[in-house]
């Protein structure tokens, strides 16, 4: 079983790295790019003996307690069978 965790800055938090990427893309001629938000992506392999609900609970706890800073970041968890 695999879990995917996407961690991104909250919309209310400035993203200087995303702004730099956006500016660079515009400078390279990709003028349709209006904004870029950067983040982190984690692939976590889990024991096959877990139920989907157990897996979700464990990965939600990992994301909340370790992978994301809840003050400035939000996360999304996806469980794949």
Image: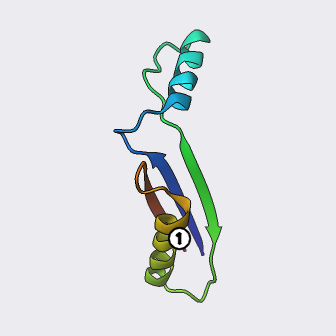
Q: Residue at x 43, y 81 (%)?
A: 53
Residue 15 lies, with reference to residue 66, above or below; the image says: above
As drawn, the residue found furthest toward the front would be 71
Which one is in front, 14 or 27?
14
Give neighbour class at mark 1: few <14, some 14-19, many 20+ (Cα, 10 Å).
Answer: few
Which one is in front, 42 or 51?
42
Q: Position of residue 50 (x, y in %)?
A: 55, 86
For the image shown, how many numbered marks are present on the structure?
1
Q: Position of residue 74 (x, y in %)?
A: 41, 53
Does residue 24 appear left or right of residue 52 in this picture? Answer: right
Q: Position of residue 3 (x, y in %)?
A: 56, 67
The N terminus, quarter of image: bottom right
The C terminus, quarter of image: bottom right
Q: Position of residue 54 (x, y in %)?
A: 47, 84
Q: Which residue is mark 1?
A: 62
Q: Residue at x 45, y 78 (%)?
A: 57
Q: Residue at x 48, y 55 (%)?
A: 69
Residue 32 lies, with reference to residue 35, above or below; the image says: above
Residue 24 lies, with reference to residue 81, above or below; the image says: above
Does residue 54 appear left or right of residue 24 in this picture? Answer: left
Which one is in front, 50 or 23?
23
């Amino acid at each position: 079983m695999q879990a995917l965790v996407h961690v991104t800055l909250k919309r209310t938090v400035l993203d200087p790295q995303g702004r730099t990427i956006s500016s660079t893309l515009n400078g390279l001629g990709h003028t349709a790019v209006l904004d870029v938000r950067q983040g982190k992506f984690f692939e976590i392999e889990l024991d096959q003996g877990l139920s989907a609900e157990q897996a979700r609970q464990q990965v939600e706890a990992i994301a909340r307690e370790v992978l994301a800073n809840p003050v400035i970041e939000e996360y999304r968890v996806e469980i794949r069978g």
